[in-house]
Image (cartoon, helix red, strand yellow):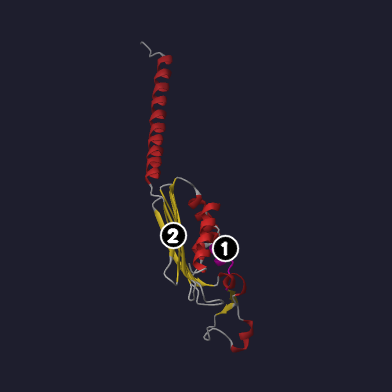
């Protein structure tokens, strides 16, 4: 009886193993390439805005507005006086990382954890901060209103919660409290105030001086 050569059998098995390994690898590679294509198609949009409104002259309101859409950044500053004079400083759209780095600073400084606060400390001006981010098909946005970021960052009091149904009246002096002071309010305001290249901040300072002078 004629035997099938062992060498050929080994060769056939080796070829089959190579083909199977190639198919598995190619399938994994196709899946990875598909994920990469999906990632590159994912929208990337960043918006940040701080509106500062005063209740007495000479400045009526200031506004910082930044955005980065698909890697193209734009930002501007606007100031308006009670006399109706308004100055706007706008940076041209450019593929720079200023806004992306700025938004990273806001994130690190806890902008997503801040909440509205009632008027405390110096009640003018009033700050309204708005942030929105769309990345990897996920979106989040937040609006926070507060006054006097120095007060909320350093001298805000403590908050006590009393549930009389669970609290022994004799233990009121032992109540647990929550510290309201949060340095992130001041940090976020400073992030906006210090944003931008030197020439941008210089123009902002000049615009502020013009409005304060009532020109």
Q: Is residue 165 left or right of residue 83?
A: right
Give how far apart the Cα atoms at labels 2 and 1 are.
Answer: 24 Å
Q: Where residue 202 sits: x, y (%)?
A: 54, 56
Q: Which segment did they paint magenta?
A: 180-189
Q: Where residue 69 sits: x, y (%)?
A: 40, 50
> Which residue in the rendered view is the most extreme toward the bottom?
169
Callout 2: helix, strand or loop? strand
Q: Where residue 89 sits: x, y (%)?
A: 45, 57
Which residue is disc 1 drawn over?
187
Quarter of the image where the N terminus is located = top left
Which residue is disc 2 drawn over?
88
Callout 1: helix, strand or loop? helix
Prevailing secondary structure class for the magenta stretch in the rendered image: helix
**Residue displayed at 62% across by 71% down:** 154
User: Is 187 in the magenta?
Assistant: yes
**Residue displayed at 43% across by 64% down:** 86
In front of the other: 181 or 161: 181
| Nearest-to-viewer mark from 2 and 1 | 2
**Residue displayed at 48% across by 46% down:** 96
Question: How dense is the environment of label 1, judged by Cα within 10 Å: few (below 14), some, or many (20 and up)?
Answer: many
- On screen, 200 above or below 166? above
């Amino acid at each position: 009886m004629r035997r099938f050569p062992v060498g050929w059998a080994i060769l056939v098995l080796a070829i089959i193993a190579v083909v199977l390994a190639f198919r598995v690898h190619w399938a994994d590679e196709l899946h990875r390439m598909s994920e990469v294509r999906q990632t590159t198609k994912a929208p990337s949009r960043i918006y940040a805005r701080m509106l500062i409104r005063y209740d007495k002259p000479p400045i009526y309101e200031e506004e910082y507005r930044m955005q980065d859409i698909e890697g193209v950044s734009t930002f501007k500053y606007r100031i308006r006086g009670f006399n109706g004079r308004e100055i706007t400083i706008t940076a041209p759209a450019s593929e720079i990382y200023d806004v992306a780095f700025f938004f990273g600073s806001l994130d690190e400084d806890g902008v997503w954890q801040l909440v509205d606060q009632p008027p405390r400390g110096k009640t003018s001006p009033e700050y309204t901060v708005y942030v929105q981010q769309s990345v990897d098909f996920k979106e989040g946005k937040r609006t926070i209103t507060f006054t006097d970021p120095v007060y909320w960052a350093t001298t805000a009091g403590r908050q006590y919660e009393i549930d009389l149904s669970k609290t022994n009246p004799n233990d009121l002096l032992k109540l647990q409290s929550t510290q309201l002071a949060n340095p992130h309010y001041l940090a976020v305001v400073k992030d906006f105030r210090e944003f931008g290249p030197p020439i941008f901040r210089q123009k902002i300072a000049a615009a502020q001086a013009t409005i304060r002078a009532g020109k």
